[in-house]
Amino acid sequence: MKASDAVRAYHQLSKHQPERFAPGPGQLDWASQPVAFRRYSGTRLLELWQRPLEESPVYDAVFAGPLGAPAPLDRASLSQLLYDSLAISAWKAAGGSRWALRVNPSSGNLHPTEAYLLLPPGAVEDAGLLAHYTADAHALEVRAELPPALGQQLQAALPAGGCLLALASIPWREAWKYGERAYRYCQHDLGHALACLAIAASALGWQVRLLRGIAERELDTLFGLDRDGFHEAEAVDALLWIGPPQEREPRLPASLLRGLAALALHGTPNRLSRQYRDWPELARIQELCRAPALAPLPWQTPAAPVRADNPGLPLRPLLHRRRSAQAMDGKAGIHAELLFAWLRRLLPAHSPVPLALTGEPPRVDLLLFVHRVQGLAPGLYWLARDTDEAQPGLRADFLWQRLDGELPLYRLLEGDARGLAGFLSCGQDIAGDGCVALAMLARFDQALAEGAWLYPRLYWECGQIGQLLYLEAEAAGLSATGIGCFFDDAVHELLALADSRWQSLYHFTLGRAVWDDRLTSLPAYAELRRPPASGSRGEAV
């Protein structure tokens, strides 16, 4: 079977239908719920700092491109990057239970995404480091100090002032609850994390770009994830450059890669669950979709114009107060101008941060369910993110009426879509109770024709779009939530799709949240570790 056909088979298997859900655990085994944080016992802990959130650039400016002169790569700047992207944002407590929320969202708040850093000598310590970021302590666990010669090789290979960061996934964290569909959620979450990192880096004057020149299977070896001692599988999905803007991808010499792969690593990975249930298709799809070494793509993108849609709004407090709504009030509405501003933010030309991160062309368009938008009739709409043209081949009765000269937004049908949106999202009222809901549809056949490795990257793009929508809702004083449970083929039937040209990969809703007042909110960290005054960065602009 061709790799692309095997991906199609997994995608079909992991679809929800009104008459049956994708294979999953059914009843949850709460005694085996995975531990929320990966830790490596026996490692040296390098504590990071928490920069005051009031020291912040303005929100609208970060999406156009890295802000100002790049920050020096040091402990203060790395602390801010990770604090504003992957750290804990709050704790919640109710009924004797306590759980963490993070800056980066996750399906089911299960957080399969882990981060590892390769730091050149002089960045944080005299020696180069391979380290794991642990969000519960907001600290780096040092897995290896690079020997001087290897550290010098790394320093020579990387442009000055930057480092490498790998994002890895632990599929079991999602599979515990979602079974075979978990791979999708891991990749959604990775897309959210990519966007979080790119936005936090932009505030530091840094660029984030995906490295394509190393086969993904080699990345597990570089970061020690293929070694003995892991009770639950973990694999690197993406290797990122983070640092001053560059025009092209640096080449990492084979001798450097061999040296990193041979490092003696400190620490033993913790066991996440007492018992583990194997979902065989997850391991298969992971292997099928690992990218080979690919030709580099240009990294330089033209800066976008800065639109002051939210004048004076500071960025960093908003990043930390983002929450996933659990219910919407079914009453609040917005003006069409606000919706148009949200949708402009999702266009690659308007938001190279984070949408230029992978270098891939946009492959995801949006089907909107407009409920309560003043100046816009309720109904179905389509946002074409990669072209200004309407999409042929969908339902014959779609109107394809363009609504705005700047925005490629089209009216398809008028009517009350609240019940439809809720039904398609596995009967969840939240999809009909917001101001607007949407389905993200990817050019599925086109992507798989290029390679099975593009399958997860479709979900990355959806996660990046979702992160922008979360922030846009927060900026407007509203809330949002991603919806991973939906009836895949029912969406396609709505569009009269007779083939797999488009596939729905992620749903979303935005509106005014109804919060559970039984929950108690607690600070993210028991102690605040402030950076030294000399390490200042993130000044208001």
Image (spheres, rainbow, N blue to C red):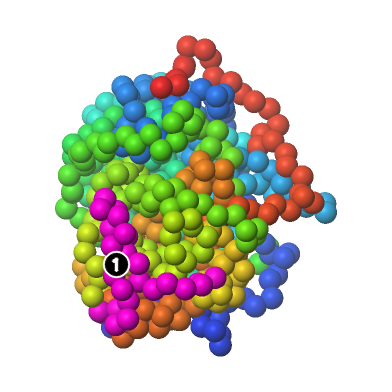
Secondary structure beneath disc 1?
strand
The spot of residue 115 in percent (x, y) is 46, 45
**Residue 493 highlighted magenta (yes or no):** no
Q: Is residue 482 left or right of residue 215?
A: right
The spot of residue 530 in percent (x, y) is 58, 21
Q: Is residue 298 left or right of residue 312?
A: left
Quarter location, residue 299: top left
Q: Residue at x 66, y 67 (%)?
A: 275
What quarter of the picture does the C terminus occupy? Answer: top left
Q: Residue at x 62, y 61 (%)?
A: 330
Q: Is residue 187 left or right of residue 5?
A: right
Q: Is residue 193 left or right of residue 524?
A: left
Considering depth in this image, is 51 or 72 the residue closer to the camera?
51
Q: Which residues are magenta?
A: 393-418
What secondary structure is the stretch in magenta mostly built from?
Answer: loop
Q: Residue at x 38, y 51 (%)?
A: 340
Seen as rendered, the residue at the extreme right is 95
The spot of residue 487 in percent (x, y) is 49, 78
Look at the image and tell me whether residue 63 can be seen. Answer: yes
Quarter location, residue 155: top left
Q: Residue at x 32, y 24 (%)?
A: 68
Q: Amino acid at mark 1?
A: Gln
- Is 258 drawn above or below residue 461 in the view shown? above
Mark 1 lies on residue: 401
**Residue 413 highlighted magenta (yes or no):** yes
Considering depth in this image, is 541 or 47 the residue closer to the camera?
541
Considering depth in this image, is 423 or 153 the residue closer to the camera?
423
The spot of residue 338 in percent (x, y) is 44, 48
